[in-house]
Image (spheres, grey):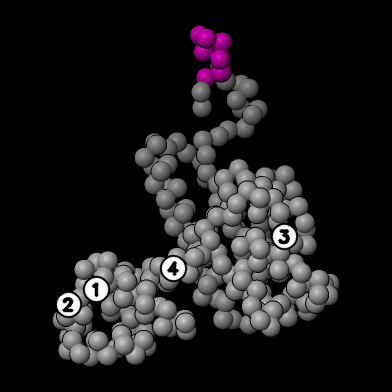
């Protein structure tokens, strides 16, 4: 099914789930019911019309796209075995990261020392893991949902902590495209939770921008990593200076 037609089908389902009939959509758009039916039967509509219908459902177009991805069976998390497979092979991990960032097979071959047969073999393994669909002509379709995350305390996170974290932070963060912010203060549990929600929202915005920039030429995009972290914490040297409570334990932070 063509992508546009599939999107219209998802839109119809979303309307049904919200109890919105063609008649109610027509009234909301200021159109005749027959015009609305014709729009849906043709399975094509303008972006403005799509946006207006989404507004009737109190949805953003981005929300509709996420519903479409979910309907396509997008992957929100790999299995433990899948992540372990990635981190066990540096070449496979590299190609996975490139594929996730929407590199084409031809660009990978131009940039890295892979033979075509070797790259196809690696892409085939990524297909089995569930990260991509390898299509005819070595076209790559990423299967990860926008809300995809690596497993908590899983192989990928352990790999970052053990192999990449120190290298990533070994920088002054003063170069082009770099920024490091560090703030400190005392927060209530409510404020802590609010900031975590905003951090998650920022991660979602990062994904939206990545999606929007896919249409740009590869030379105009840089592989970019965003790491956000927050936790109640102090230097071990500071903790060592804390007074002990009556039970003989250090005072809590």
Mark 1 in CB contact with mark 2 (< 8 angstroms): yes
Circle 4 residue: 71
Q: Distance between the residues labelled 1 and 3?
A: 43 Å
Q: What element carries label 4?
A: helix
Q: Which mark is residue 24?
A: 2
Residue 12 magenta-highlighted: no
Task: Quickly name the residue at label 1.
Answer: 56
As measured in the structure, the alpha-carbon distance from the residue carrying label 1 to the one carrying label 2 is: 9 Å
Q: Is mark 2 on a helix, strand or loop?
A: helix
Q: Say which of 203 and 40 sits in front.
A: 40
- Residue displayed at 63% across by 48% down: 80
Q: Residue drawn at (17%, 89%), measured in percent from left and top?
A: 32
Sequence-wise, the earlier of marks 4 and 3 is 4
Magenta segment, prevailing SS (helix, strand or loop): loop
Is 249 positioned to the left or the right of 39 in the image?
A: right
Mark 3 Cα-neighbour bin, 10 Å: few <14, some 14–19, many ≥20 = some
**Front one among 149 and 182:** 149
């Amino acid at each position: 099914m063509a992508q546009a037609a599939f999107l219209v089908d998802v839109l119809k389902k979303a309307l049904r789930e919200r109890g919105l009939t063609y008649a109610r959509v027509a009234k909301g758009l200021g159109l005749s019911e027959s015009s609305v039916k014709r729009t849906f039967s043709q399975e094509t509509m303008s972006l403005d019309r799509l946006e207006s219908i989404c507004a009737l459902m109190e949805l953003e177009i981005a929300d509709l796209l996420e519903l479409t991805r979910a309907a396509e069976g997008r992957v929100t998390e790999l299995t433990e075995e899948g992540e372990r497979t990635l981190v066990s092979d540096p070449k496979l991990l590299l190609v996975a990261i490139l594929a996730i960032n929407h590199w084409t097979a031809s660009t990978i071959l131009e940039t890295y020392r892979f033979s075509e047969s070797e790259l196809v073999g690696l892409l085939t393994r990524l297909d089995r893991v569930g990260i991509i669909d390898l299509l005819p002509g070595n076209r790559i379709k990423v299967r990860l949902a926008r809300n995809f995350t690596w497993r908590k305390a899983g192989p990928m996170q352990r790999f970052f902590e053990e192999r990449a974290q120190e290298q990533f932070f070994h920088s002054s963060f003063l170069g082009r495209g770099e920024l490091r912010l560090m703030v400190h203060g005392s927060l209530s549990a409510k404020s802590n939770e609010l900031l975590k929600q905003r951090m998650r929202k920022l991660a979602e915005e990062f994904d939206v921008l990545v999606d929007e920039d896919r249409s740009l030429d590869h030379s105009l995009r840089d592989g970019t990593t965003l790491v956000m972290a927050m936790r109640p914490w102090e230097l071990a040297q500071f903790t060592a200076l804390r007074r002990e409570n009556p039970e003989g334990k250090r005072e809590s932070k």
